[in-house]
Image (tube, grey):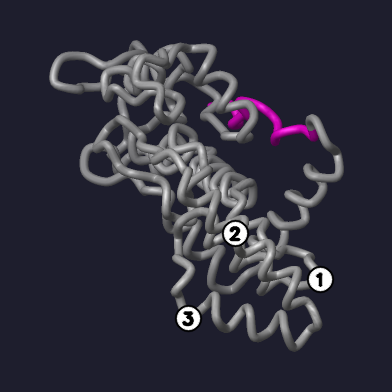
């Protein structure tokens, strides 16, 4: 059997190099974090039941790690994760972000603690001004809802600006055997789940190009061979001709 190949390199630096470099540093910090990384890594669902045999395939571990790294990157790209990172006043910046995102309100004890800290640092007036602006903007925030599969409301959470389509793809990379499928087959599965590629865009179409772009930019690793050729009746996998899974 051939060695596994990558379905695309890790996301290249695009648009502000400074921002991309910052995200890379944050990714590295997350990977080394003794609590956060295991938590993120655990979000990659492992295959069970009739797909348990896929764990024994060559390249499985590389595919699993690529999915975990993709989730790390998606987490690092969120405003919540970047708020306060490498900041002169991380506590103040983090609190202001959480307030503006609707995660906390102006009466939260965290805001009081941050204001006390700002005064101690001689930044009370500046913090109060930024605080007022955040409160005003928060009242104008439009609720962000991901229409499928469960209509989950995203605003007011740490993942409010994460890409739920890509998060789902990375989380299910192994458990739905996406790593054994062509991008075309993946797009058909996701379309069947009525999972649009963008929040608040229920009419957006998930096609092969959408999947190819996501797989490439997230650096998700596929098996060297496309073992799952399609999905038959009742979700039964159509395997490559002559291929018999080892159980």
Report the number of numbered marks. 3
Callout 2: SS: helix
- For this orientation, the residue located farthest to the left is 234
- At x 78%, y 42%, the residue is 20
1 or 3: mark nearer the eye = 3
Q: Point out the tag, 2 or 3, that comes first from the N-terminus.
A: 2
Q: Residues within 10 Å of mark 3 (few under 14, many from 20)?
A: few
State the image coordinates of residue 55 (x, y, percent, origin top left): 39, 44
Per the image, the residue denoted by label 3 is 109
**Main secondary structure of the magenta stretch:** loop
State the image coordinates of residue 63 (x, y, percent, origin top left): 53, 40
Callout 3: SS: helix
Q: CA distance from mark 1 to mark 3?
A: 22 Å
Q: Residues within 10 Å of mark 2 (few under 14, many from 20)?
A: many
- At x 44%, y 38%, the residue is 164
Per the image, the residue denoted by label 2 is 97
Q: CA distance from mark 2 to mark 1?
A: 15 Å
Question: Which residues lie in the magenta part?
Answer: 1-13
Is label 2 in contact with label 1 (beta carbons under 8 Å)? Answer: no
> In the visual, does 103 lie left or right of 76?
left
The residue closer to the viewer here, 77 or 139, is 139
The residue closer to the viewer here, 27 or 84, is 84
Q: Residues within 10 Å of mark 1 (few under 14, many from 20)?
A: few
- At x 52%, y 62%, the residue is 99
Reply above or below: 96 against 214: below
Per the image, the residue denoted by label 1 is 88
């Amino acid at each position: 059997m051939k060695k596994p190949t990558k379905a695309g390199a890790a996301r290249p630096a695009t648009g502000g190099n400074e921002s991309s470099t910052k995200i890379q540093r944050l990714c590295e910090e997350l990977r080394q974090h003794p609590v956060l990384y295991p938590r993120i890594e655990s979000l990659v669902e492992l295959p069970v039941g009739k797909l348990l045999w896929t764990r024994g395939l060559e390249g499985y571990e590389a595919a699993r790690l690529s999915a975990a790294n993709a989730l790390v990157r998606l987490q690092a790209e969120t405003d919540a994760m970047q708020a306060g990172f490498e900041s002169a006043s991380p506590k103040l910046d983090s609190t202001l972000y959480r307030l503006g995102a609707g995660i906390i309100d102006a009466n939260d004890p965290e805001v009081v603690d941050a204001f006390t800290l700002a005064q101690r640092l001689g930044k009370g007036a500046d913090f109060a001004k930024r605080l007022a602006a955040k409160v005003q903007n928060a009242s104008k925030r439009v609720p962000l809802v991901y229409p499928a599969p469960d209509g989950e409301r995203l605003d007011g959470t740490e993942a409010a600006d994460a890409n739920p389509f890509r998060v789902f793809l990375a989380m299910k990379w192994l458990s739905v055997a996406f790593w054994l499928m062509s991008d075309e087959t993946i797009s058909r599965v996701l379309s069947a789940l009525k999972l649009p590629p963008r929040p608040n865009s229920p009419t957006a179409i998930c096609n092969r190009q959408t999947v190819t772009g996501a797989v490439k930019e997230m650096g998700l690793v596929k098996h060297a061979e496309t073992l799952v050729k399609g999905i038959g009746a009742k979700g039964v996998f159509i395997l490559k001709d002559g291929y018999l899974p080892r159980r």
